[in-house]
Amino acid sequence: MGLLIRNGEVVTVGSRAVADIYVENETITRIGKNLEAPPGTEIIDATGKLVFPGFIDPHVHIYLPFMATFAKDTHETGSIAALIGGTTTYIEMCCPNRNDDALEGYQLWKSKAEENSACDYAFHMSVTKFVKETESQLRQVVADGTASFKIFLAYKNFFGVDDGEMYQTLELAKRLGVITTAHCENAELVARLQQKLLAEGKTGPEWHEPSRPESVEAEGTGRFATFLENTGATGYVVHLSCEKALQAALAAKSRGVKLSVESVLPHFLLDKTYAERPGVEGMKHVMSPPLRAKENQAVLWTALANGSIDTVGTDHCPFDVAQKLLGKDSFVNIPNGIPGIEDRVNLLYTCGVKRGRLDMGRFVDAASTRAAKLFGLYPRKGTIAVGSDADLVIYDHNYRGTISSKTHHVNNDYSGFEGMAIEGRPSVVTVRGKVQVRDGKFIGERGRGKLLKREPQHF
Ligand code: URP
Ligand code: ZN
Ligand code: ZN
């Protein structure tokens, strides 16, 4: 049965026009005015609503053994929350640690998602050590359709790689045409500063930020860029949080380094005073890189508006209150992460588009199209065009609501964005032509999501 979406304002990066969209066999087959609907066609009236390409979150953690515990979501809960918030594809960090076998880890991460995700998904393959079998293992992962790597310059002795391993990873990535994403903080400085602060009796969550100051992130960003420059590889900085790190990234871009930048929702909207709140309230807002001084937010918004920041992800990583309390005696034991998968699109629309910080085209680009292009999903994903997958978000910009853990779908007992107002939300969300969400409710098919195979393209 076909699907006809009638009379919505169709928004892509370069265009806005009222049109009908016709979908057959999971794919957009026609876009135009007054399209005919064969008998039996499902018809959705989108009059007065915006129609966006399905949004893509390029940075999420669903299955994640980390800091003596596990992130809370499963693919079932995470994907439903994502879809309710308008995200139809996410890219999960596949994160075996240094002591794990990389290929076994890759199979494990795949098995967690298979038949459990309601939205489409892909992986960034983390390289957390570089030993003799790494090259052949990574070749197998890329041949399997996972055409992006992840390295951590932080998290010493767990996920973190040293400079030699970073060099080997990037040199291989260059040969394979794979883009490498990177968490950029200097692991040694973080470890030393943590020890120093703890020795001074500074144990609360308010000391998390001073243990990983902006200069530590700027150094990591600059070093990653220098390694890209000298290997010719293509890179992507994840969750860039502050002006100093942005300057390092922009300096590299301006000298021709092939580098893109992602910032994540918490850094646009929350500042370090959230992590300075007493007790567990502060712990809820501990992530890395940390929430920063408020002045950075205006810098990030400006860079996002002008495209210097390419994409907005979430770094979705839910730990509940009991898990956060693992760090009650020492901030270094607070599981790092803030959930956001359900809120990214609505908050970016509200605080970006509605507040005049972001034009509509850039919003679509940053939250969907550019990630699709960088990570080998375009034009299958990331746009509304004949031949593209029918991942569509019919968006009700007249909706008014408030974010709360009492009503959200993420498997977590708090929201980092509790009480924030939203002005707009998806009214209908489709995944390859099937309606999965209507007005804040998941009504679709669990397990519909497919692993998206991607070809290397960064030669
Ligand atoms: O605090 C964070 N960001 N937690 C998730 C792991 C990571 O570094 O992305
Ligand atoms: Zn990270
Ligand atoms: Zn992350």
Image: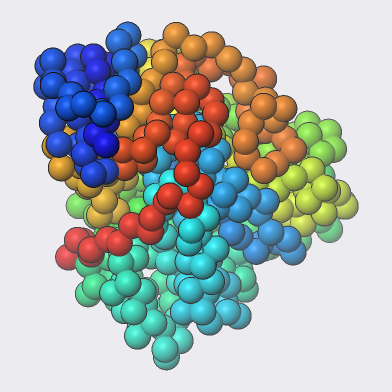
Task: Say left or right for 254 vs 289.
Answer: left
Q: How is the image coloured?
A: rainbow
Vertical placement of residue 44 versus 223, above or below: above
- In the rendered image, the residue lying farthest to the front is 39
Q: Residue at x 24, y 73 (%)?
A: 176
> Is 110 or 419 nearer to us in this picture?
110
> Is 325 or 157 nearer to us in this picture?
325
Q: Residue at x 44, y 36 (%)?
A: 436
> Is 305 or 388 nearer to us in this picture?
388
Vertical placement of residue 436 versus 295, above or below: below
Specify the quadrant that holds the C terminus. Answer: bottom left
Specify the quadrant that holds the N terminus. Answer: top left
Q: Residue at x 24, y 34 (%)?
A: 2
Q: Residue at x 58, y 72 (%)?
A: 97
Q: Tell me which corner region of the image, top left, top right, bottom left or bottom right, holds residue 49.
A: top left
Image location (x, y in percent) of residue 249? 35, 47
User: Is residue 215 visible in this depiction of the protein?
Assistant: no
Vertical placement of residue 211 versus 29, above or below: below
The image shows a total of numbered marks equal to: 0
Image location (x, y in percent) of residue 138? 36, 77
Task: Say left or right for 193 vs 251.
Answer: right
Image location (x, y in percent) of residue 210? 68, 45
Vertical placement of residue 116 versus 207, above or below: below
User: Is residue 449 visible in this depiction of the protein?
Assistant: yes
Image location (x, y in percent) of residue 21? 20, 26
